[in-house]
């Protein structure tokens, strides 16, 4: 469980479900992430390649994530050939945002 040490105590998702949720995000990122930007220290912008069911999939994950991690502000903006997901947090949860960026696999690439 050390891999999930960054998950804050304020997350209400049951501990045994956390690896499954993280895996859902990892799969989405590995399949669909085309760009990542950090326009502000407490905001992350992810562009996901659109396709059949992608927006619904993102909305479902965002809805479930919002229920257990109320410290996130998650905004979905559909666009031409992409679904943009913006994730914002307060200063107390900046490490969570860092961990999400790191999990994308392209976090260190310039955008």
Image (spheres, helix red, strand yellow):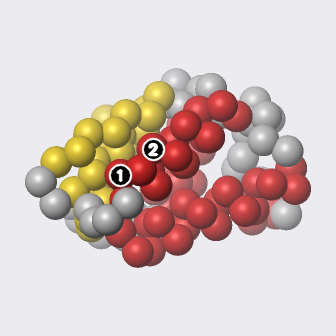
Q: Which mark is residue 55?
A: 1
Position above or below: 73 against 35: above
Which residue is drawn at the image coordinates 62% and 40% (left, top)? 64
Where is residue 44? Give x, y as percent.
Answer: 37, 44
Cβ atoms under marks 1 and 2 closer than 8 Å: yes
Q: In the rendered image, which quarter is residue 92 located in?
A: top right
Q: Quadrant of the C terminus?
A: bottom left
Helix, strand, or loop for circle 2? helix
Where residue 54 appears, as percent x and y from the top left, is 37, 59
Quadrant assignment, res 1: bottom right
The residue depicted at 54 percent of the width and 48 percent of the height is 61
Q: Residue furthest front?
A: 52
Q: Is residue 94 left or right of residue 75?
A: right
Disc 2: CA contacts within 10 A as few (<14), some (14-19) or many (>=20): some
Judging from the image, what secondary structure is the residue with disc 1 in? helix
Q: Is residue 25 above or below residue 60?
A: below
Residue 76 at what x, y percent from top left?
34, 39
Find residue 24 and name its label: none
- The answer to whether residue 91 shows anywhere in this view is no
Indicate left or right for 72 with 10 as reference.
Answer: left
Would residue 8 be seen by someone viewing this image from the given angle? Answer: yes
How far is mark 1 from mark 2, CA to CA? 6 Å
Please give the residue where the numbered disc 2 appears in the rendered image.
59
Q: Residue at x 52, y 54 (%)?
A: 100
| Residue found at x 44% / y 66% | 29
From the viewer's perspective, is 104 left or right of 96? left
Count of residue discs: 2
């Amino acid at each position: 469980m050390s891999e999930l040490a960054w998950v804050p105590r304020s997350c209400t998702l049951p501990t045994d479900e956390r690896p499954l949720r993280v895996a859902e995000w990892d799969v989405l990122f590995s399949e669909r992430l085309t760009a990542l930007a950090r326009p502000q220290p407490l905001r992350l912008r992810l562009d996901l390649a659109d396709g059949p069911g992608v927006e619904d999939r993102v909305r479902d994950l965002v809805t479930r994530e919002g229920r257990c991690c109320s410290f996130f502000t998650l905004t979905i903006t559909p666009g031409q050939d992409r679904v943009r997901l913006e994730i914002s947090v307060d200063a107390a949860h900046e490490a969570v945002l860092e961990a999400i960026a790191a999990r994308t696999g392209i976090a260190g690439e310039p955008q």
